[in-house]
């Protein structure tokens, strides 16, 4: 049964102290999810509102071209005057220059269809080979592997022949408890094998690259890097510490494990064979989690480890069966720390990407604001929905809101009942509705556009869209909230699907997201058919379509889209 209207009265004003208490008329059902009425007698002002005398609009951007050529992006970075470069621009320009030097140093070597395998002993004694390997590690490590590698770099330098002898999978992700497959690996061998693994991963030979990463982790745990100071001076200039080498190793581990995670299980091996447990979806997620922890340990001033930990928090829903709202809250907490650290270090990519993903988490309910009716009228409560919160315990911190003391007491009694019954804060009961403070979503989006525009000046903004799963979600939410519904500040929206946070859908990579809107099966696993009415979502069966229509919120969205596209 569709509710005609629900009225939420706030005890505390979201516009800040000193303002008049806000009255929120929330029209549910008649106008669709997220549509509000008037706030404090004032009309909505479209896509902007006054804060401290400043009228801030929603700074919308068109989707960037994710297929921009590496040559064009590189030229823009190098042509930017040095005094105009941001920290990120300077880092990339330096990396491009280093790779150009590397290509020039390979000009005397013949072009091959595939790299030549040579004994490791020959490479260890060659300072030129060490310098080439260190240059590659430095360039990719300082740019978080966002920089392109030319074919010359992939195929001209010889490979240490022993890379193919790492044939055993790890039994545990505890490197100190694992047995190495190779013998006599020191700092020089570590540098050569790490560069080899980077090239393998770039060429698409991913699961051997991941095995090499773990092999090197084992050797690092056994003291292979203790004599780092004995490396040649030019190598140390590029890789000044063993911690930096371990950070790049962990970053490569994340890239390789995520690449395999996004594939179908049957496609994770380069040749036929039984899939080892380490390449299972759960095993790969655990590997990313471990590597992200090592990134944070080796480079505590880098936001990259927090970014990857946030991705793990989201993927815990389909893999570890974490509640979707708990995952959204976990992810949001990590991303706030991520973009705060990115602001301090000047990483424009994560300054933008982490804010967009944090905004997506808020759209999915990470704010923890829930509305429902009690005796006396509707009330609201803000719960701490992180997975670390116990389902039961002596106390829980809650922010209770309502028009009267009786309503607030009723909400308090209901929350006490949930606590006594062991109901996790992230579990929504019947009649509860997720509310979203859309002005916080817009603030994060607008703040993200500042570093985004800085990246656009040297044509690297496409990385933000390509690496942010939340761009389209946040963009659509703000368009619905501000352009179609014209909500005013203090007037809550409803989480679009109201499906209680992230859904159990595995990340399939950018451009491969087509999946059943109800159960999450992707196009690689089942045949999907598009909704004939709105042409926006896909289903694996009529049952899933009916379920999403009745209980998933698609009925309202589909009708609204159909009306606006006629």
Image (cartoon, rainbow, N blue to C red):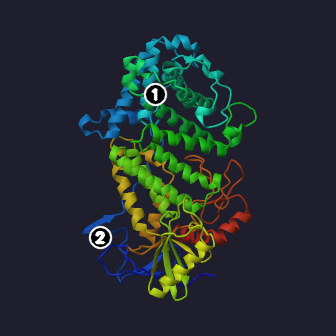
460 over 11 or under it: above or below: above
44 over 244 or under it: above or below: below
Is 526 displayed left or right of 404 in the figure? right
In this view, the residue in front, 44 or 294, is 294
> Which residue is at a point 65% across and 21% down the rendered structure image?
165
> Which residue is at a point 30% across and 41% down the rendered structure image?
86
Q: Is residue 74 something that shows in the picture?
A: yes
Query: Residue 255, labelled with which disc?
Result: none
Mark 1 lies on residue: 137
User: Image quadrant of residue 213?
Assistant: top right
User: Image quadrant of residue 17?
Assistant: bottom left
Residue 100 point in image, percent of width and height:
39, 24
Residue 464 point in image, percent of width and height:
44, 47
- N-term mark: 1 or 2: 2
Is 114 displayed left or right of 467 in the figure? right
Query: Residue 50, labelled with which disc?
Result: 2
User: Image quadrant of residue 457?
Assistant: top left
Q: Is residue 107 something that shows in the picture?
A: no
Is 355 displayed left or right of 200 in the figure? left
> Which residue is at a point 24% across and 69% down the rendered structure image?
53
User: Which-is-in-front pick, marks 1 and 2?
Assistant: 1
Q: Quadrant of the C terminus?
A: bottom right
Q: Disc 1 versus disc 2: distance between alpha carbons? A: 48 Å
Residue 451 point in image, percent of width and height:
35, 49
456 over 538 or under it: above or below: above
In this view, the residue in front, 222 or 480, is 222
Mark 1 lies on a secondary structure that is helix
Q: Quadrant of the N terminus?
A: bottom right
User: Label 1: few (<14), some or many (≥20) within 10 Å?
Assistant: many
Is 373 displayed left or right of 68 in the figure? right
């Amino acid at each position: 049964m569709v509710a005609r209207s629900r009225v939420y009265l706030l005890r505390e004003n979201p516009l800040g102290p000193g303002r008049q208490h806000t009255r929120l008329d929330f029209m549910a059902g008649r106008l669709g999810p997220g549509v509000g009425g008037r706030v404090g007698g004032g009309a909505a002002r479209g896509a902007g509102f006054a804060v401290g005398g400043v009228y801030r609009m929603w700074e919308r951007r068109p989707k960037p071209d994710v297929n921009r050529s590496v040559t064009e992006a590189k030229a823009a970075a190098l042509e930017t005057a040095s005094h105009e470069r941001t920290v990120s621009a300077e880092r990339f320009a330096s990396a491009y220059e280093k790779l150009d030097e590397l290509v020039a140093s390979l000009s005397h070597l013949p072009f091959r269809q595939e790299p030549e395998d040579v004994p490791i002993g020959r490479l260890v004694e060659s300072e030129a080979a060490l310098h080439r390997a260190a240059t590659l590690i430095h360039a990719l490590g300082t740019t978080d592997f966002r920089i392109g590698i030319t074919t010359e770099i992939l195929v001209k330098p010889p490979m240490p022949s022993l890379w193919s002898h790492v044939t055993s999978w790890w039994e545990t992700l505890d490197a100190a408890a694992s047995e190495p497959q190779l013998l006599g690996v020191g700092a020089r061998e570590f540098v050569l094998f790490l560069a080899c693994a980077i090239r393998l991963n770039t060429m698409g030979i991913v699961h051997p690259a991941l095995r090499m990463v773990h092999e090197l982790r084992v050797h690092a745990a056994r003291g292979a890097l203790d004599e780092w100071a004995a490396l040649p001076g030019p190598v140390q200039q590029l890789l000044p510490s063993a911690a930096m080498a371990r950070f790049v190793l962990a970053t490569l581990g994340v890239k390789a494990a995520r690449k395999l995670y996004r594939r179908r299980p049957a496609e994770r091996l380069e040749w036929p064979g039984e899939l080892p447990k380490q390449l299972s979806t759960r095993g790969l997620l655990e590997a990313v989690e471990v590597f992200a922890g090592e990134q944070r340990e080796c480079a505590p001033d880098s936001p990259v480890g927090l970014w990857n930990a946030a991705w793990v928090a989201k993927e815990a829903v389909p893999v570890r069966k974490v509640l979707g709202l708990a995952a959204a809250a976990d992810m949001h907490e990590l991303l706030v720390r991520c973009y705060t650290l990115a602001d301090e270090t000047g990483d424009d990519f994560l300054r933008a990407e982490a804010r967009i993903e944090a905004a997506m988490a808020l759209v999915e309910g990470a704010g923890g604001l829930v509305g429902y009716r009690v005796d006396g009228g509707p009330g609201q409560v803000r719960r701490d929905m992180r997975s670390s919160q116990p389902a039961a315990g002596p106390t829980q911190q809650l922010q209770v809101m309502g028009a009267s003391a009786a309503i607030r007491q009723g909400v308090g009694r209901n929350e006490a009942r949930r606590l006594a019954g062991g109901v996790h804060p992230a579990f929504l009961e019947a009649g509860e509705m997720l509310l979203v403070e859309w002005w916080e979503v817009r603030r994060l989006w607008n703040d993200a556009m500042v570093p985004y525009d800085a990246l656009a000046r040297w044509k690297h903004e496409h990385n933000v869209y390509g690496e942010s799963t939340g761009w389209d979600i946040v963009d659509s939410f703000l368009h619905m909230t501000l352009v179609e519904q014209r909500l005013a500040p203090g007037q809550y929206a409803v989480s679009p699907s109201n499906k209680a946070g992230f859904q159990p859908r595995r990340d399939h990579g950018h451009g491969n997201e087509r999946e059943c809107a109800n159960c999450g099966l992707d196009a690689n696993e089942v045949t999907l058919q598009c909704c004939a009415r709105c042409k926006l979502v896909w289903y694996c069966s009529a049952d899933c379509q009916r379920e999403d229509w009745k209980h998933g919120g698609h009925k309202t969205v589909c009708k609204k889209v159909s009306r606006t596209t006629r």
